[in-house]
Amino acid sequence: MFWTFFVCLLLLIIETSSFIDNNGEIKPIMEALQTNVTVISGQKAKLACIFSSINHELSLSSSHQLIWIRQSYGSHNGDSILAHNQDLLITDYRLNIQRTDHDYSLTITNVNIDDEGIYTCEVNTQPPQKAFVHLYVQVFL
Ligand SMILES: *[C@@H]1O[C@H](CO)[C@@H](O)[C@H](O)[C@H]1NC(C)=O
């Protein structure tokens, strides 16, 4: 009798918590770890998008395509795709890309003022989702 009650209570708790998950605010499946990243010129910047596991129905799988984009800057008109999944699409020895089950990150070593700008990570969900990271570079003369 006691155990039946206990199990029912447990099931109720589990039900209730999944209810909240499903009907609460829908979390994006991909978010910037930090929206604003500020680094000093010459240092390393890590721009990271993290995958949320809160929404079990909307989870990211290894079949999803991920890209890092740099928004137009300076004389570069239009966005440039920097990386697709693990692959860098531009030649810049300072860039490093990493994709794990939890995040997708772009690391820039030896940052300079020209790197300052807006970067976005994007996933080809339906509809596609993107997260923005603003990189600020401080230069001390
Ligand atoms: C990022 O920077 C912008 C502009 O400087 C500011 O409006 C915004 O609140 C900052 N966001 C966070 C999460 O700090």
Image (cartoon, helix red, strand yellow):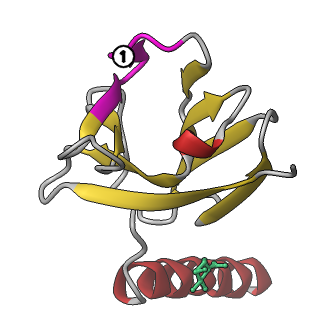
Which stretch did the figure color magenta? Answer: 81-92
Q: Does 98 sit above or below residue 77?
A: above
Q: Which residue is label 1 attached to?
A: 90
Q: Position of residue 127 (x, y in %)?
A: 13, 60
Q: Quadrant of residue 19?
A: bottom left
Horizontally, residue 74 falls left or right of residue 141, namely left
Horizontally, residue 43 falls left or right of residue 127, namely right
Q: Quadrant of residue 41?
A: top right
Horizontally, residue 110 falls left or right of residue 125, namely right
In terms of depth relative to the viewer, which is nearer, 99 or 57?
Answer: 99
| Farthest residue, direction left | 126
Q: Does 77 sit above or below residue 86?
A: below
Task: Decide if residue 57 is in sight here.
Answer: no
Q: In the picture, which quadrant includes the N terminus?
A: bottom right
Q: Is residue 86 magenta?
A: yes
Q: Is residue 27 magenta?
A: no
In terms of depth relative to the viewer, which is nearer, 109 or 11?
Answer: 109
Seen at 55% across and 41% down, the residue is 115
**Label 1: few (<14), some (14–19) or many (≥20) C-alpha neighbours in 10 Å:** few
| Farthest residue, direction right | 141
